[in-house]
Image (cartoon, coloured by chain):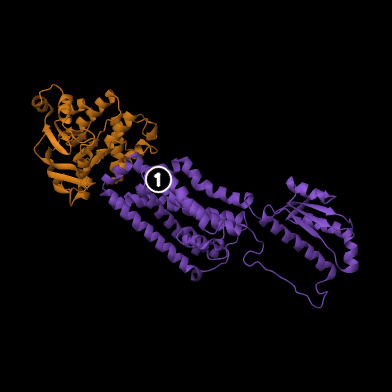
Chain colours: A purple, B orange
Amino acid sequence: MKLFFSFIRKEFWHVLRDTRSLVILLGMPVMMMLLFGFALSNEVKNSNIGILDLSHDESTQLLTNRFDQSRYFSVTKNLTHESQIEEAFRKNELRMVVIFPPKFRESLLHTNQAQIRLVGDATDPNTSNIMINYASAILRDYQNEIFGEQKFPYQINVESSMLYNPKLSSSFNFVPGVMTLILMLLGAMMTSVSIVKEKEKGTMEILLVSPMRPLMVVITKAIPYLLLCFIDVLLILVLAYTVLDMPLRGNILLLLAESILFIFTTLSLGLLISNLVDKQQTAMFISLVGLMMPALIFSGFMFPLENMPLPMQIISNLIPTKWYYSIVSSIMVKGLGIKFIWKQTLILVAMTVFYLAVAMKKFKIRLE
Amino acid sequence: MLNEEIVIKTNKLTKTFGDFTAVNAISFEVKSGEIFGFLGANGAGKTTAMRILCGLLSPTSGEAMVAGYDVYKENELIKKHIGYMSQKFSLYENLTVRENIEFFGGIYGLSRKELKEKGNDLIGRLGMEKEANKLVGSLPLGWKQKISFSTAILHQPKIVFLDEPTGGVDPITRRQFWDMIYEATDAGITIFVTTHYMDEAEYCNRVSIMVDGSISALDTPHQLKEQFETDSMEGVFLKLARQAKRGE
């Protein structure tokens, strides 16, 4: 046992003295969270819009102010002619233009009807759609104010509610995503690189001729990374809660337990890689290209899996990140308990056992 | 310090990989306190033989005892009683000298107190008091090799295996390194060393030369030179190595 600890202490020295890996281990999660939280968001916030007001009356003034005050838009340009719209889009000055026709208030009050046109720059279709929806909501609110809720005897009122994420905040999507990616990358890459490094430097040979059991050598190398990955999970959760207002609706202990399980999965993948290759660069390359890319594509975090062709959906089942991502978002966003995620959990357990078994088999063969 | 206790004994030791016979029925004995030179061209099977004796590889057939233990069944016990230093440099660069000593001593089961005493003693003997807390990566190669050897014998093994220990080191440091080897034999440690430097072969008590997986010659350097009628070990080696059919 004393031996065990002196090994782990040695491993920590390695990690703590290697500034580069320390920066990767602790800096990367923070950087990714901040990037996704503030820079790479697909939410609409203070988007530049233009107003083409052809009637200049009380109502259009009021609506213009409402648009400007909402957190989604800021009115940056007043247009005078329709021909200016395209020009503004081409210069990327505006994302959307609201057109009030002449005599807007008059026709609204006298005929109870008025038209407004919303013109969006649909170069980015998703954003454009979201903006049109927000703008319609502002207009609907105004309409309800002046006409009251029940004006017509027959009316279909559409009331949509976005369950679990009423504000459509993108952090609900990317926090589980970042957690999955970070653990996958760091767990597999750092472990495999650190073991392969010992092979490359020749210290592995010394360890293998020593009375230390080979299995113990490998396990003690993985433990510091287990701990560091766990710290990363905590770091991400704290950042999500404090900086990004992401709630944690489910049981935090369950989430942490599932995270530890997934860290085991990635570490065993790391062990597997380290037994297959002899060069640090190869290990890094395999981790980055062979694991990171599938993890990104097949987790359901960036691209919805339901929209993929069937063969790709089938492949996605083989990628552990898909299951962990589903577990994390079920717990964090929907507040589900183990009853709803036991299937995903079992799949991860099975994958881990499989990777470990193959890694151990390869390890023995190499020694013989 | 030579006595008649035999610490390594092999009998027709053989290792095959598929249909390639890396080590072909080698038989030899090494006596306690001896410096045994294990020579051979690249690819002659030295490393494989050494790995078997260290308990890293299982032989295909034949017998071998190391430090009184059988290489088939008791390889874990062998590991406890030997030291090993490889041709690749074998300390952790981002650990200090003291941490390396304590770590490698520790994996051979030395207690904390022993580690402290032996570590201080060793650092004193090497004259590295100032460098003890420096990272090994910042030291010159010759120093690293001395520390490496010292840590390999810290737990006082019966035998220490040195796999080309002086590769890439200048002649002065090599000379100093051999002084350390002699000191170790004075303490009763048997040295099993491979080398490509023929002047180093002259320092050995006995030398074996492997050609194509077999031992073609085994004697004291003096006897070998007489037998092959040359005045240097280099001559002996060249005459033997010329018979080799196997390439690298």
The numbered mark 1 sits on a residue in which chain? A
State the residue lying farthest toward the top. Answer: B231
Identified at 61% across, 52% down, the residue is A37
Question: Where does residue A288 sit, x and y in percent of width and height?
Answer: 47, 48
- Return the x and y of residue B164 as percentages of the image width and height: 25, 33
Q: Position of residue A55 (x, y in %)?
A: 89, 56
Q: Quadrant of residue A308?
A: bottom right
Q: Is disc 1 placed on a helix, strand or loop?
A: helix
Q: Residue at x 61, y 57 (%)?
A: A171
Q: Judge from the rendering whether residue B78 lies leftward or rightward of residue A234; answer left or right.
A: left
Left or right: where B236 falls relative to A353: left
The residue wearing badge 1 is A194
Q: Using the image, determine if residue A68 lies above or below residue B191.
A: below
Q: Nearer the viewer, residue A16 or B238?
A: B238
Q: Which of these two is toward me, B113 or A78?
A: A78
Q: Is residue A343 visible?
A: yes
Q: Give the image location of residue A368, x and y in percent.
A: 25, 49
Q: Compared with residue B213, is residue B74 higher up or lower down, i.e. above or below?
A: below
Question: In the drawing, does residue A221 fall left or right of residue A147?
Answer: left
Nearer to the camera, A114 or B140: A114
In front of the other: B78 or A342: A342
Task: Examine the image and state in which quarter residue B240 appears.
Answer: top left
* Residue A1 visible, this orientation: no
Q: Tell me the residue at 68%/52% (across/down).
A: A123
